[in-house]
Amino acid sequence: MTREAAELQAINTAWQIAIQEILRVVVRDMYMTGDEPAFRSRVKRIEETAVESIYSGLVLRGADEWTQVLVKEKASNFVTTLLTSFTYDKV
């Protein structure tokens, strides 16, 4: 891997970790403020809104069709995977 590719990989990884940790704090706060149905509803709403935003953001940025399809799929899968990893388990 070239130095530039390694640096890009490190930046992408750092960005993903930062966003994931911010989201964990937001979800943790939601978790503390309600019951399971409310928690699940909020997480689902975040997921749907994020995926919709990804789709419209790519179009507004003028990305070509191939890039739109690839990024939509990858980003949507990432959002879904991350958000479905949260469970409601108040003790």
Image (spheres, rainbow, N blue to C red):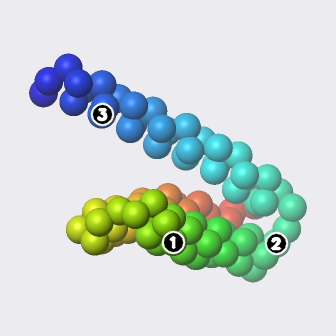
Q: What's the residue type where badge 1 is placed? A: Ser
The answer to whether mark 1 and mark 3 are in CB contact below 8 A is no
Q: Residue furthest top?
A: 3
Give the crowd class for mark 1: few <14, some 14-19, many >=20 residues within 10 Å: few
Whether 33 is drawn above or below 12: the answer is below
Identify the residue position indicated by label 1 in the image: 56
Left or right, 63 with reference to 66: right
Give the crowd class for mark 2: few <14, some 14-19, many >=20 residues within 10 Å: few
Whether 53 is drawn above or below 82: the answer is below
The answer to whether mark 3 and mark 2 are in CB contact below 8 A is no
The answer to whether residue 80 of the structure is visible from this angle is no
In x, y percent, where is residue 20? 55, 46
**Quadrant position of residue 90:** bottom right
Identify the residue position indicated by label 2 in the image: 35
Quadrant where the N terminus sits is top left
SS at circle 3: helix
Q: Front-most of 47 and 7?
A: 7
* Measured Cα–Cα span from mark 1 to mark 3: 25 Å
Indicate which label's residue lies in the foreground, 1 or 3.
1
SS at circle 1: helix
Left or right, 33 with reference to 75: right
Quadrant where the C terminus sits is bottom right
Left or right, 43 with reference to 37: left
In x, y percent, where is residue 36? 75, 74
In x, y percent, where is residue 78? 42, 60
Indicate which label's residue lies in the foreground, 3 or 2.
3
Give the crowd class for mark 3: few <14, some 14-19, many >=20 residues within 10 Å: few
Identify the residue position indicated by label 3 in the image: 9
Indicate which label's residue lies in the foreground, 1 or 2.
1
Residue at (66, 75) in percent of width and height? 45
Q: Residue furthest right?
A: 33
Q: What's the residue type where badge 3 is placed? A: Gln
